[in-house]
């Protein structure tokens, strides 16, 4: 095994060296013949950048793969990669129509399926064949769409390739696949070094299509391999987790464009990475977040093979639910500033109508959370040889618990709040819903099954887990909003007065969609409040701390919310603000009589 590791490392190193040597040559050729991506409104980069980086990935990968002596075993991925590379280069040079590329991708996918490689997700050969073609074409396009920000596609490809390599490395008889993945990994790492922000070269369609089809095809299973269909996690979920970021990005972009009346093939700054930048992350941070999510998914995919099925289900389901909630928040980020005048007829109005039914999505989420928590409670309570017996008790009572719990949520009003404004009273509503739902579930089980072979401990663990996940999912939007506010560049604000009025000022100004404020912190002369936190922001000190902020040019606006503010202190603060050109304002609250204006007074002859 050690000698195999050395050989694989040498193949990967050779690919890295060759690709590194080719990249400057590819840049020169691209500039010489005008194969350059120019800045456009639907593209993210700001400088003309050469596009032939994919050539430096593909040529060393294919050449070294032929030298490994495993040409027969690698015939399918090599030919598929070569075919998609040719399509990609042609598109980079001549700009093919989307339909032309799609036909080519379907043709390549069909050849792969004809070779005997399939997903083996179902026992129906017809359905599995169709799913395999969709997998190959969809994932190829997903990597192509993911190539929208410096280092993103290449970084995700490195993570996915490394994960597949780890799986093949420990699989007997998979030396050819492991060697090829080591080569692709080395070449992609070499490109990634020059593609991180600010990128000096792009991979173009030649690189993204090659990586997409290579990863998609190597994730398949040939007819000669034994498939354990009893472990659906390793057969279905693990491959999806390896490439979850490209899949999630493609789904988000596709649905967003359908809802907004745009063509799916239309380019734009509406990808996951772009939305992360819009909410306040830097370009590198946005890419880093997606890399981190991909690494987390990769570890879960690897763990699926080593953990017991039940624990793997829990971890995988929790991660997928968290990804869905995160994507739901990103879907609300405004990235389209020009709405088409008329939405196209057909499926789009139906999609728009469904997407506006947010309560449906909430109920579906809670269905998943209740199921997940109830299963976790049983699994935590019976983590031993007795689990198979108690699994039957879990299974027979699950429909009862889910039905009772969701009905209870509806009755107590859990579906009347807005996630963006989730607060303490919403938490109380969920606490009441979980408590009443748990007691009602126990009563129903006692009536239906007599509570024989059921555990009281399960119904202690279950409500605790459910309340935690419910509050966490609802508060997630508010937490992300708070994170965005803290990173958002805007008018720097200091609030004098860390009381109820100060909290109200912060809530109103930070929630203003028209004026971007960035709260520096609160100021209060009461020593008992200093160094505490209000609305998540620190109380920085008293008048002296404010004067220091003004003197250091660390604040643009000072809002006085305190009712008691003596003239001497006011003059000192006012003098400091005037000298540094800082706006000084006072917050006041008063009621005004509302008088309706007669219609006749508004009318004009």
Image (tube, helix red, strand yellow):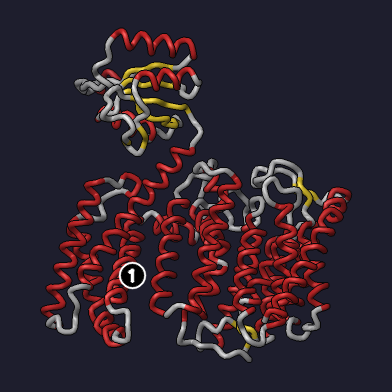
Quarter of the picture containing the N terminus is: bottom right
Q: Which residue is mark 1?
A: 372
Above or below, 574 relative to 493: above
Q: Is residue 339 visible?
A: no
Residue 38, x across and y down, in percent: 75, 45
At mark 1, the secondary structure is helix
522 is higher (above) or lower (below) than 168: above
Quadrant assignment for the C terminus = top left
Q: At 58% across and 62% down in the image, what residue appears?
A: 246
Residue 353: x percent and y percent? Answer: 40, 56
Task: Decide: few, some or many residues near mark 1? Use Cα within 10 Å; few <14, some 14-19, many ≥20.
Answer: many
Q: Determine which quarter of the picture holds residue 319.
A: bottom left
529 lies left or right of 3: left
Vertical order, 244 against 35 (above or below): below
469 or 356, nearer to the observer: 469
Question: Where does residue 240 sit, x and y in percent of width and height?
Answer: 53, 71
Residue at x 44% of width, y 70% of height: 316
């Amino acid at each position: 095994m050690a000698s195999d590791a050395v050989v694989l490392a040498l193949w990967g190193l050779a690919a890295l060296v060759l690709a590194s040597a080719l990249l400057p040559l590819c840049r020169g050729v691209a500039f010489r013949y005008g194969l350059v991506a120019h800045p456009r409104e639907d593209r993210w980069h700001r400088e003309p950048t050469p596009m032939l980086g994919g050539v430096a990935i593909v040529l060393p990968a294919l050449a070294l793969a032929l030298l490994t002596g495993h040409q027969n075993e690698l015939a399918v991925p090599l030919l598929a990669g070569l075919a998609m590379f040719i399509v990609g280069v042609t598109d980079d040079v001549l700009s093919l129509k989307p339909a032309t590329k799609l036909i080519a991708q379907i043709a390549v996918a069909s050849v792969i399926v004809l070779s005997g490689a399939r997903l083996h997700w179902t026992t129906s050969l017809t359905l599995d064949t169709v799913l395999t073609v969709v997998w190959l074409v969809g994932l190829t396009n997903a990597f192509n769409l993911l190539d929208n920000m410096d280092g993103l596609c290449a970084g995700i490809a490195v993570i996915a390739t490394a994960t597949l390599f780890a799986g093949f490395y420990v699989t007997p008889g998979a030396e050819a696949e492991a060697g090829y993945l080591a080569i692709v990994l080395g070449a992609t790492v070499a490109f990634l070094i020059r593609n991180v922000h600010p990128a000096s070269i792009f991979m173009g369609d030649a690189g993204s299509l090659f990586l997409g089809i290579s990863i998609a095809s190597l994730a398949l299973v040939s007819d000669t391999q034994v498939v354990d269909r009893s472990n659906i996690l390793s057969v279905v979920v693990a491959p999806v987790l390896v490439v979850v970021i490209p899949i999630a990005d493609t789904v988000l972009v596709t649905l967003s464009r359908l809802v907004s009346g745009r063509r799916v093939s239309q380019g734009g700054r509406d990808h996951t990475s772009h939305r992360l930048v819009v909410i306040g992350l830097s370009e590198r941070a946005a890419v880093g977040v997606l890399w981190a999510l991909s690494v987390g998914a990769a570890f879960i995919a690897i763990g699926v093979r080593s953990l017991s099925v039940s624990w793997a289900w829990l971890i995988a389901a929790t991660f997928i639910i968290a990804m869905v909630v995160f994507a739901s928040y990103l879907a609300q980020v405004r990235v389209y500033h020009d709405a088409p005048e008329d939405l196209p007829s057909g499926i789009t109005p139906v999609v728009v109508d469904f997407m506006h039914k947010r309560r449906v999505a909430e109920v579906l989420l809670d269905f998943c959370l209740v199921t997940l928590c109830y299963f976790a409670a049983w699994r935590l309570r019976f983590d031993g040889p007795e689990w198979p017996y108690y699994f039957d008790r879990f299974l027979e009572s699950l429909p009862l618990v889910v039905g009772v719990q969701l009905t209870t949520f509806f009755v107590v009003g859990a579906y009347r709040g807005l996630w963006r404004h989730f607060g303490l009273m919403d938490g109380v509503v969920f606490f009441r819903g979980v408590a009443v739902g748990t007691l009602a579930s126990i009563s129903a089980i006692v009536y239906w099954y007599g509570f024989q072979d059921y555990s009281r401990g399960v119904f202690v663990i279950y409500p605790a887990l459910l309340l935690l996940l419910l509050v966490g999912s609802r508060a997630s939007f508010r937490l992300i909003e708070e994170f965005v506010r803290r990173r958002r560049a805007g008018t720097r604000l200091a609030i004098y007065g860390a009381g109820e009025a100060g909290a109200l000022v912060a809530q109103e100004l930070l929630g203003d969609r028209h004026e971007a404020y960035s709260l520096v912190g609160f100021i209060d002369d009461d020593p008992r409040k200093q160094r505490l936190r209000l609305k998540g922001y620190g109380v920085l000190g008293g008048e002296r701390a404010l004067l220091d902020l003004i003197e250091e040019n660390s604040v643009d606006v000072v809002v006085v919310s305190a009712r008691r503010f003596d003239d001497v202190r006011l003059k000192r603060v006012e003098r400091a603000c005037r000298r540094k050109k800082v706006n000084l304002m006072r917050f006041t609250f008063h009621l005004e009589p509302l008088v309706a204006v007669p219609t006749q007074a508004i009318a004009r002859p």
